[in-house]
Amino acid sequence: MEGAEEEILKGSQALIGSGKAVYILVEDFVRSQIVEYLEQTGARFLTKLTPYNSFWQYGKK
């Protein structure tokens, strides 16, 4: 759902906090503030394959 990334991530806190590796693809051109949210909540940036999205990871490295 475009524009609802932060709400979806907040609703996924049990999974994100489980310590398991969780990989996320974010269309960061829709709402660039999502990158700030990911950084503040401990997500690790993995890569950016296009100008329109980025891949992130929570949990195990």
Image (cartoon, rainbow, N blue to C red):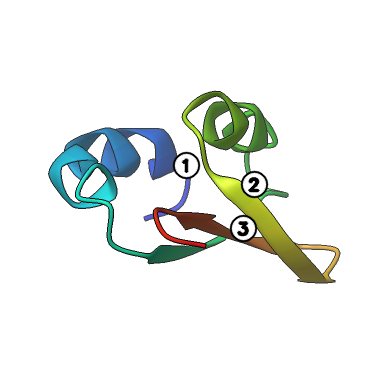
Mark 3 to mark 2 CA distance (whole Å)? 6 Å
Few, some or many residues within 10 Å of mark 2 (<14, 14–19, 20+): few
Few, some or many residues within 10 Å of mark 3 (<14, 14–19, 20+): some
Q: Amino acid at mark 2?
A: Val
Q: Which mark is residue 30?
A: 2
Residue 58 image offset from top left, x and y in percent: 44, 52
**Which residue occupies 54% across, 36% down?**
38
Few, some or many residues within 10 Å of mark 1 (<14, 14–19, 20+): few
Q: How many marks?
A: 3
Question: What residue would you read off at disc 1?
Answer: 3
Question: What residue would you read off at disc 3?
Answer: 27
**Which residue occupies 28% across, 62% down?**
20
User: Can I make out residue 38 in this image?
Assistant: yes
Q: Amino acid at mark 3?
A: Glu
Q: Are marks 3 and 2 in contact (CB under 8 Å)?
A: yes
Q: Amino acid at mark 1?
A: Gly
Q: Indicate the secondary structure of the residue bearing disc 2.
A: loop
Of discs 3 and 1, which sits in the foreground?
Answer: 3
**Which residue occupies 38% across, 41% down?**
4
Residue 26 image offset from top left, x and y in percent: 56, 57
Compared with 13, 54 (above or below) is: below
Residue 35 image offset from top left, x and y in percent: 65, 37
